[in-house]
Image (cartoon, rainbow, N blue to C red):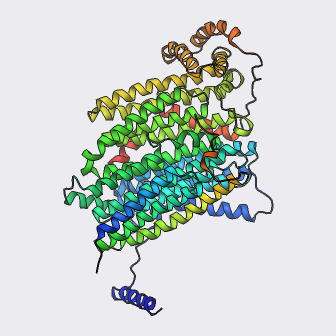
Amino acid sequence: MTGSTGVLGALAAHLLGAGGLVLPHLNYSTILPELILLGGMLVILAASALSPRPLPTEVYATATVGLGIASLIASLVLWRDVTSHGAFTAIARSIDVDGFAVFFLVVVSCILIVAPMFAAGYLRREGITGCEYYVLALISGSGAMFMASANDLILIFLGLEILSIPLYVLAGLDHRREASGEAAMKYFVLGAFSSAIFVYGIALTYGATGSTNLAEIGAFLSRNVITSNGVLLGGLALLLVGFAFKVAAVPFHMWTPDVYQGAPTPATGFMAAMAKAGGFAALLRVFVSTFPTLRTSWQPVVWVLAILTLVLGAVVAIVQNDVKRMLAYSSINHAGFVLLGLEAATARGIAGSLYYVFVYSLLVLGSFAVVAAVGGNGDADHDISRYRGLGRRRPVLAVGFAILLLAQAGAPFTTGFFSKFYVVEAAVAAHSYALAVIAMGSAGVAAFFYLRVVFVMFSDVGIAGASDVSRGGGEIARAGAVAAEVREQDATLLGGAGASAVATLVAPAYVAAPELAPEGTPSEPEVSVSPWVTTGLVLCVGATLVFGIWPQPLVDFAHQATLIF
Amino acid sequence: MSVHASWYLTLAALLFTIGAVGLLVRRNVLVMFMCVELMLNAANLTFVTFARALDDIGGQVAVFFVLVVAAAEVVVGLGIIVAIFRRKVGATADDAHMLKG
């Protein structure tokens, strides 16, 4: 007892002796976007608890979109400050306000504007009431924002957890489906594992450099030439592993397909966009701006990660019959492309990565929204056979999905083309020729499985017959057959020959189909699309096309963001 | 008598390894959670040791953040476990095997 009072007394005396506790100056305007999201989240939560009748999900969706727009405006105001006054740090130097941070604030705001639109239609269809999705999405978004603007490893860790913990819950949102719960558990266990690794990495880095502040670590490393400090390199390696788990880089990707497949589809789209945005924001900042002096140590590791991620993501996606799972592997492939920019570690590479993350976020959100619509009630069946004839039944939806898929494949006149072009160009400029070639090869492989879905949507019988047969027979044989079929058409499709080419190519497959088609093919599933989803898709597809044809504004934005760093 | 910092660091590294191996080897989800806690506390021990060695308060403050986050994580994790295993007998990770491919 006396001991504890003695300690307290000494502590008080110490604080008073040092002139009292010095509180940092809190410049709230620098974290205004985060505060808008968190404040709005509390209001939504209170409104849902206090309202006498359950509010319809559209009310929450509207509020979330409004908050997204508000945080977008706040981010743009910060952008104006940064461009006119230059980058600065705030709140005891733990918050960085620079172009890089503001870029990700804008990306996160855009995700939060689009994601609720896709969720509203789905949640109504599935009868999931309540405000949970929106509240969790807002918390998660604020975490991603903190990760982007953090200037301290501890704040990055806090941001990472604020980002991740709501995502675990989102994965298990549909508690009536067993798969959803399983996805949540897998995500949680591996997410907690990666967080623990990440914290240990911070601890080792702190021990080696004497600070968790990124600026101080950078200053320490530029004062002292450290090339082979085991503690520091170990910390760096653990940090990289922690980030690699979050952004789903191979070999730390094993949770991704299961979680993406099991989670409710709008939650999948949201986590695919948000976790990658937050994860890459912190990954790029920590490695490029804080540890540039150790580049020779981490660059080869990132090189290996990038190659594994690019190749495995593309190759394994080919053999997937489940479109949701295929998109999960394709998102792994995309992570490889962003790593390309990190590996280059040049201003051009970082600008390419930033641009890629922005483009990817909207593409993946839109794609999963279509998957949610086609998946039908219960979110159970995402087999590629459900997409057969979608072009005839829902032409506009199918065309929208086709544009999103082609953009992911890197087709010209879409944002996807430029995003791939910039990171590969940066890799070439940094003399990573092997990596650039492998990236292009993986893009070619990836184009195949995107085009396969596009082809199934616009061909009524051909591939679908083959797909049904394969379910009984050997999966690989079918994949091979489809591969051969579609590969022939790749060139023509990409050449822009369009519908007539598809029609002529469908003909031979159609002839072969009747004897292949088994008895009792399931009747064509109904696909209903709510106006909310339509609005969101129009935004995603519109952005893909507009910035694909007129890329300059977005490219300039990414480029300027890396200049003010 | 003071114990050299390297002993604490070695202990922390050992605890971290035990936690990491345990998480990968054990099949009971609750034991897996405990392994995560072990890993986080190993990191905490490392923080405190370095804080003392460097004579810097920052490392000790970091421990508070890690503790709070660990508590929040466990709350969510146990919630997820309860939601899944309400209709099942045991909490074995291998029982959750719907998603694969």
Q: Residue A88 lies in what quarter of the image?
A: bottom left
Is A265 in front, or is B42? B42
Residue A508 at what x, y percent from top left? 61, 6
Give the number of callouts: 0
Residue B98 at what x, y percent from top left? 64, 40
Is A298 in front, or is A525? A298
Q: Residue at x 62, y 11 (%)?
A: A506
Residue A284 visible (yes or no):
yes
Q: Is residue A263 above or below residue A524?
A: below
Residue A352 at what x, y percent from top left? 38, 39
Q: Residue at x 75, y 28 (%)?
A: A525
Q: Residue A397 lies in what quarter of the image?
A: top right
Is A363 in front, or is A547? A363
Residue A565 visible (yes or no):
no
The residue furthest bottom is: A2
Q: Residue at x 65, y 29 (%)?
A: A383
Residue A76 at what x, y percent from top left? 47, 52
The residue furthest right is: A53
Q: Is residue A397 above or below residue A251?
A: above
Is A185 in front, or is B57? A185
Q: Is residue A71 above or below residue B56?
A: above
Q: Is residue B58 above or below residue A255?
A: below
